[in-house]
Each structure stands twice: as C-alpha cells, then as structure tokens.
Amino acid sequence: MHLPCPCCGPRDLREFTHKGADDYLRRPAPDAPPEAWDDYLHTRANPAGRTRDLWYHDPCGTWIAVTRDTVTHAVIGATGLEDAQ
Amino acid sequence: MKRRATGGSALTRARKLGFSFDGRNLQGLQGDTLASALLANGVRLVGRSFKYHRPRGVLTAGSEEPNALLEVLRDGVFHPNVRATVQELHMGLQARAQNCWPSVRRDVMAVNDLLAPFLGAGFYYKTFMWPRAFWEGLYEPLIRRAAGLGRLPQTPQDAPHERAFAFCDLLVIGAGPTGLMAALTAARAGADVIVCDEDRQFGGRLLSDTGQIDGIAGADWAAQVVTELHALPNVRLMARTSVVGAYDGGVYGALERVALHVTAPGHAPRECFWRITAQRTILAAGALERPIAHPGNDRPGVMLLSAVASYWHRWAIDPGRVVVFGNTDHALATARALAADGMNIRAYVDPRTDLGTDAPFALRAGAEVVATHGRHGLGAVTLRQKGRDIRIEADTLALAGGWNPSLHLACHMNGRPSWDTAIAAFVPRPGMVPGMDVAGAAAGRFSTHAALHDGARAAAESLAELGLTSPDLPLPLAEDAPYAIAPLWQVAAPGRAWLDFANDVTTKDVAQAAREGFASVEHMKRYTTQGMAPDQGKSSNMGALAVLADATGGTIPDTGTTTFRPPFVPVSIAALGAGGHGKSFAPERRITSDAQVRAMGAPMLEAGLWYRPSHFPQAGDRDWRDACNREVLHVRHAVGVCDVSTLGKIDVQGPNAARFLDFVYTNTMSSLRPGRVRYGLMLREDGHVMDDGTCARLGEQHFLITTTTAAAGEVMRHLDFVQQAFCADWRVRLGSVTEHWAQFAVAGPLADDLLARVLDVPPALPFMGCAGVTVGGVAARLFRISFSGERGYELAVPARFGAALFRGLLALAEGMGGGAYGLEALNVLRIEKGFVTHAEIDGRVTAFDLGMAGMVSAKKDCIGKAASQRPGLHGPERLQLVGLRPVAHGTEIAAGAHLYAPDAPATAPHGQGHTTSVAYSPTLERWLGLALLRDGRARHGSMMRLDDGLRGRQAAVEICNPVFFDPDGGRMRG
C-alpha cells in the first residue's frame, strides 16, 4: 500500500504512522462543554466506505489527511493538514 | 520408467550430476528436476502419504505437486516438504523420503492403512474424546508424534535470504503462450514490463507440447520471443519466481528461488522475497490438470497426462506401457500426439461413448478405470467397459480429468469466481483484483490460438490504461481445437478413490462429512482436512467440491469454493522474514561514548533502540550492585559523568515559538528568560501525562526542549501534529536534533571544579541556567540542570566531538575521586530524589497523580487541559505518587509488588496500588521505592503491606514523601 505524501510523493505504508480519524482536527474550544470534549476524544464513526484519517510521514515530518475507502482499500487522495481543515 | 536415449529439451546430456536418494547414489543430468532424475533412475516410490502411509509417487511436473514431498539437504540440515518437481538437480544433492520409518519401502506406520475404516474423516474429533483423563498423558503426545508432514530442522537457520522491491508498468504472471504474447506486445509498446514464471525455462505448456506456432515448434517460438524480450531494456524476465499473493494497491508478493539449485551457494541468497508494485497486471498463470477420483488412483505410476507429456518432452522420460484415462478431446489429442512421437500407449479410456475409431492405440469408449494393481508401483489397471472388467498390464496410468484455470491470484482479494459449464471449471470474473486482467488458460481459454489472442488483447487493454499505443503485431498462427469435456468427478466403483493425495482424503471422507452435517464447503474442508496440505488442494479442491455437491444434492456453483488465500505456493519463513530479524529488525543506536564504555567492561542495556551502559564493573566487585553503589557515592561525594545523549532533543525556533510551547506544555514557557531552563510537563489531549523534560530558552526566538529517551519519537510526532493541525499559520519551526548533539551529565559537589578545567571560559550559571560555551575552541552548550539532586550540569557538544569529550571528562572525574556512572546509578540517584520516569508516567497517570496539578497553568489553554479537568481524574480515588520504605531496613523490595492494608487479603479488590521503581540507596543505606497508591498523599506516615506475588515476598512498608534525599533541594540549587 502506498500513500501520497504531498511533500515526497507516493511512499510505502511502512514509512507512515497512523493516528486515527480526521475528527482530531476539529478540536473544541477550551471552554466547550464536557460532552463536546468527550465526543472529540472518544466518539468515532466506523464507516464502511469512504473515510478520512490522519497519518504522519516519519521521514519528512508531514501530517496528512488521507481519503480512502475501507471497503475497497482504495486510496483516493491525501492533503497536508493546512488544506484539510 | 527410464531415460530415452535422445530428446529432452531441458537436458544438457553432456553434464552428468551425481545425487543421492535415501542413501542410494544415483545419476541425473543437468536440467533435471529431482523428480525427473528419480524417474529416470526408475524410482517411482518417493514417499508415504500423511495419514495411511500409502506408497506415493510423482503425480505432476509442477509446483502443485501433492505427493513427491521430500527432505533435501541444504546448508547442513534436511529441509522437509521440498517438492521434487520444483527442486532442480545439482551435483551432490542429497534427498530422502519423509513420513516413513525405517524406510520408504518398509514403513511401519503403513499399518494405519489397515486401520483405515477407523481413521475416516474427523476420526480424531471422535476417537480422542474419552476418557477425558487420557488427553494430556496419552492422546496429545501420541498425536504430536504422528502429526505433521516431515520434520523441521531443530537448529536456527541463518543461511542468507533477501527481500527486494520492484516497480513496473505491467506485471505479467506466467510465461506460457499467453504471457509471452502479452509481454511482447507491451514491451514493443515501450512499457516497463516484468515477466515472472515459476519455471527455470520460459514457455509454459509450449515446452511440453508438439503443437506449432507460425509453422515452427511452440518451444522454438517461445525461445525466439524470450530472446527478443531479453534484449529489450524495458523488460525484466524473472525465472524461478512464483508470484504468491495479490494485495492492495497493485502490490504482489513473489518468491524467487535464487540459489536453491546451486551446490555451493556461498553467500548468495537462497531465496528472495519480492514486493512488486505494478500499475497493471496480466495473470497468465495457465491451468492445472486435474486427476480423476477412481479406486486406487494414488498408486505410484499414476500421473497426470500433462506430467507424462512434460517428462517425455522436456526430460526424455519413457513412462513404459501407458494407459490414458481422460474425458476431453484435448486428452485424446494429447495421447495421439504422444503416440505419434513414439510413446507406448496401450489404451485410451474415456467414459464418453463416441471417440471415433482411428487411433494407434485401443480406444476404450464408454469405459472407466475401476482398479489399479501393484504393491509399490503400478503393474496393471482394470477398466470396466459395458459392465465387463478388462485388465491391462501398464507401468503408467495417465489421468486427464480436465483443466482448472489457475485463477488463485485473482481471488486473493476475496473475489469469488463464476462457474463455466462449457469447461466444467471455475473462471475469474472481471475486476476481482483492481488493475488485474486474467488471460488465456487462466481465464478458461484453452487453445493455443485463444491464448495468443487473449494475451495480445489483455496487453492492448493494459497499454490503453497506461496511455501507451499498442504496436501493430500480427497474431501468430496456432491450433484452435475445441476442448469438449464430459465432466467425470468420481468413478462409481468399490474401493477408496483419492481426492487429496497429500492429506489422504477420499471421496468417502467427503461424503461422510456431508452425512455428518459438515455440508458447507468450508466445514467439509476443515472436517476432512481436504485442501489443507502444502499443495493447498490445487489438484483436489475441484474434485472434492463436485463430490460434496453430489453428496448434498446441490450444484457445483451453489456449493461454491473455499476461500483462496496467499501464498500460492509455500513460502519459507526465512524468505518472508528476510531482512527483518535480529539487528535488521531492531538496529542499534549507539551513543558517541559507546566504544569507550564497552572497553570499560560496562554491560549495555537496551533503551528503545539505544544501548546505554548499565554500570562500570571493577575488580573485587561482588555483583553489579557494588559498582552501582560506588557510582552513586561518586556523585554524592565527588563528581560523576554520565552520557545522556539518548534524551530526545527538539529545536524550536520562530517568532511564535514561545506561544507554541505554551500551548503544548502545561506550564508557561513564554515567561522564561533567555539563558534559563524550566522543567515542563506535556499532556496528551485526553488529559494524561505524555512526557516530561526540560525547556531551555537559548534566545528570544530559539528554544531547545528535551524528551525522555523512550518518548522522543512520540513527542516529535505530537508536536508536529499540534503545529500543523492547530497553528499552521504560526511562525514556528521544529526539528529533531537528538543525534546532532552528544550530551554529558556532570554531577556532584566537585562538578564546578571539573568544568573549570574543561571549559575555555567557565560561566557562572545559576541553577536552571544555560549558556553557550566553548570547549577547546569548539562551540558547546552548558545547562545547569540536575537529575541526580546534586549540583549538576549537562554539557552538549556536536556529536562528532562526543567521544573525545567523554574521555576528557572521565579522566578529570577519576582524578578527582569520581568517575563514570551508568544507567543503574542514574536510576538510584533519581529515586532518592523522587524524580519520575516512564516507570511512573505509564500512560495512565495525570499531573494531579504526580502531585504536579499546580503545573497546569490556569491562565492559558494547553493540549490536554480541558480533559485533565474531567471528573474522575482528581481526588482520593486516584492512585497518587508516594515514596515507601520497608520498616525493617534490610528488607529487599521489588518493583511491581502490590500494596494492601496490613490486614487485608492479597486479592485484587483490596489492592491499593503498586510500586513503580525501587532501589537500594547507598546514600541512605536502605531500600526505597516509589509507588502509585490510592489517595497516597493523604497516607504519608501510614503502614501498608507490600505483597510481591511473583517472587513470593512480603514486607511491611511505611508510606512517605517521594523525595527521600535533600527534600528542600539545597544541594542542587546551592
């Protein structure tokens, strides 16, 4: 499996570290209610189909949001986090 | 069987090769496989079957061989389950039969065959159930001894193996007529092509046929194409390479037999495991001939017709008197061609009634083989025609039950094939593996013309996908004979008819499984073990499926196939793990003082991938603790030197660097003045402590932060994430500089004296101060920080000067009554001071638990702050950091022991916490421990019972402040 790093091009899966769903990008305000923080930290969808999750390309230090399909395993694309918000 | 005087396209007659089988010295020829060499020597009995220990001979001429599994000597040990049909002969090869004792001809366990009525499908599930007490003492050891095919070498195998990676536009799997036509088409179009074939020679079935292409022998046409492909720079030909698995993203696993055919391979890799990434793939793996389940079909001398033809054409093996048992026009045509070439075919047997009349051998239409005869090898067959039994003397029975497309790889991503009634076989559906096209016989198109045509078509479609233009290539002329099959799955006659030769599964076993309720194909497989031998049922799955369908009254497509999984052929663990064991799996990171500390005799401890000195032994030490105590006292009373380069170092720069650090640390770093250092705590976003370390402000916009050794990578990833996800527009940049700097702790009352002799101009640094200095003119950094509780510094120089600086510091320290200290002493020093490491920061503790709640600034947001304020992360129910000491001074304690109230039983519900770190303190002359204890801070002064269930030890301990030594910090601040 290869993931497209915006910095380095398509690279082998073993160069990446997985973090989890792109929900982690949507950090609640510091004073958001506990429910919002609980949601942010713990509630995850488990989609059959298209999903977007976060990967770290260790050699270049770039975090990317990868759009992929959990059913077909197709990798549809990836962006740096600046463009992923 | 014997070798013919002439012929054999694979052979180099001039080069004779001596080899041995079961201790007998035999002779083969260059180009032989082990199977062909054995047959040439008249050896038909090559092994015993798995369960009944029946005599078995060679069935096939390819990697699908279920019978001829031998032990072959490689690198000094016998390797089991080597397929004789794949192993190429080399000078001095030693092979022996497996699964038999004392010899393959007189095998004691053959008694199992007489017990066969009791050993049918699922016998072990029924037989070994009772009495229950017999299981451990009798049944299990018995089964263990009898189980398994062959014996594994009992010593570690370190012969070289390799892994490699390749990329291409088009991967062509199989180099028969389909694959070669596809490769030629794509190669002429300029595509980057890889062609893999299992065989040593390219050509596939063309090597074993007499058919012509464009007016020349098929094998010659193949040779011409290979010559052209060889000359092209955009084509890589990989012989002896089995593609074993299809994976996501166009990735294929392939096993290359690099040096298994070489007598003395030396340093050459025995096998290489490839990962090939292809834009497009054409599966042209051909088809596998299937046997027919008739009584006695497992006797040595029973072979597939395709194998008989291969051995005849390629290795000049004369099968003697042959009876052919087939059910297709293709089988009859093959028999005719072989007879025309001089083979002694005595009869052609076919259940179909209309075979015509004109043949150079007896045509037995409407007939079936119902029995075979001969003890260790075939001597005669009995066929039944119109109710009459006819016995024919024969040396070889050639079975031709039709062909199964080799669609395995197309099914590796869980695609299910569809049933094609016309050829009575499963064929692939389009798009089962993205980017893969299946062509030729692998797609059920069996004639040579169809193969060539389909290869060209598949290549053209792949080229279009790749954006390349197909060359104008005329299609070579070849036969296009119809296949015409009348399915024959089992012969209805008394006697055992084998489906799975390797695992001894008969038609009766499959029918019995269905009767006993294991009627789904996946259940039948597991109940009978059909298809679970090394050949994975390549010659038996289809037959078993058909017999199961018959037994359950269903159709074959409704019964369905079992799941095709990688690998297509057995892959050795050595090849699969090549480059991934030992130091390749965990490379060593070495500190700059590595050579010096090893020369001093220090045992090395692993810290992640790093190696750090444990302690420095001296003559007269009773054990490591003597050395450790000495080193601790050096630091407490003189000066010690310790390599701390393994701590993670991250350089943070930019106008917004301070703001960024405020966001990732719980405490405030923006208020730090340049030239000062501050201890910092980082939380995970879930509110638990991630790591701790120091933060030095080297300049207004320049910080250097440290992490613990183990968490360096995690912290770097975390900081990059926070920066890129939440403050991408802030002007701050991060860089790991862990390996750029060698850093040494210099600690003890004489630390200043030592540094005065090292530094060109020693600065007067306050506690928690930092400054740029020079050491012999080399720019260095000095930090006045202490992890020992003594007046201490850390001195950092560019890594290339590390070894020299360590030698210099060490010499000076030893001259002052001190010396080097290792990881053990470092640990004792920090426990005496109650400093935490990842033994305490175990991922479950919070700042509150560590007594550092005050470090979470109320004035600003930071990562983890919101979650750290959740209910349940504060209060008396939390495990809190405490110190403990045994009431009796001499009592030794250990980390991991649990704490209970003095009178409470040592059971989980009564557990109050556990020790995280312990040490013998030479400073305080007693054992000390750090612990996480429920409501610990409120329990200072109370007595607890420490129960070390692992070592069976108990101790009464007193709970106390975790800072045992110099609690007000006067020594390090001073």
Image (cartoon, coloured by chain):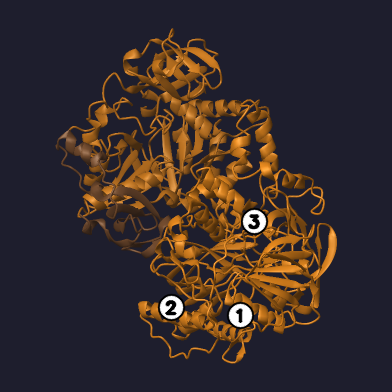
Q: In the rendered view, tell whether residue B591 sits above or below residue B226.
A: above
Contact flag, marks 3 and 2 (Cβ < 8 Å): no
Q: x and y percent of residue B360 in the render?
A: 71, 82
- Whole-number angstrom distance, CA of label 2 to CA of label 1: 20 Å
Specify whether disc 3 shares its chain with disc 2. yes
Callout 3 crowding tier (Cα within 10 Å): few <14, some 14–19, many ≥20: many
Q: Which residue is mark 2?
A: B458
Q: Which residue is mark 3?
A: B498
Viewer-closest of B381 and B112:
B381
Q: Going 48% across and 30% down the picture, which residue do you hit?
A: B827
Contact flag, marks 1 and 3 (Cβ < 8 Å): no
Q: Say which quadrant the C terminus of chain B sits in.
A: top left
Rendered shade, chain A: brown
The first of marks 3 and 2 along the sequence is: 2
Viewer-closest of B282 and B306:
B306
- Label 1 element class: helix
Chain designation of label 2: B
Chain designation of label 3: B
Q: Which residue is mark 1?
A: B206
Chain designation of label 1: B
Q: Can you name the residue that lies furthest to the top here?
A: B903
Q: Going 64% across and 29% down the picture, which residue do you hit?
A: B136
Q: x and y percent of residue B512 in the render?
A: 57, 46
Q: In the rendered view, tell whether residue B637 sits above or below residue B24.
A: above
Q: x and y percent of residue B399 in the render?
A: 65, 68
Q: In the rendered view, tell whether residue A6 sits above or below residue B930.
A: below
Chain letter corresponding to the colour orange:
B
- Whole-number angstrom distance, CA of label 3 to CA of label 2: 38 Å
Q: Is residue B138 visible?
A: yes
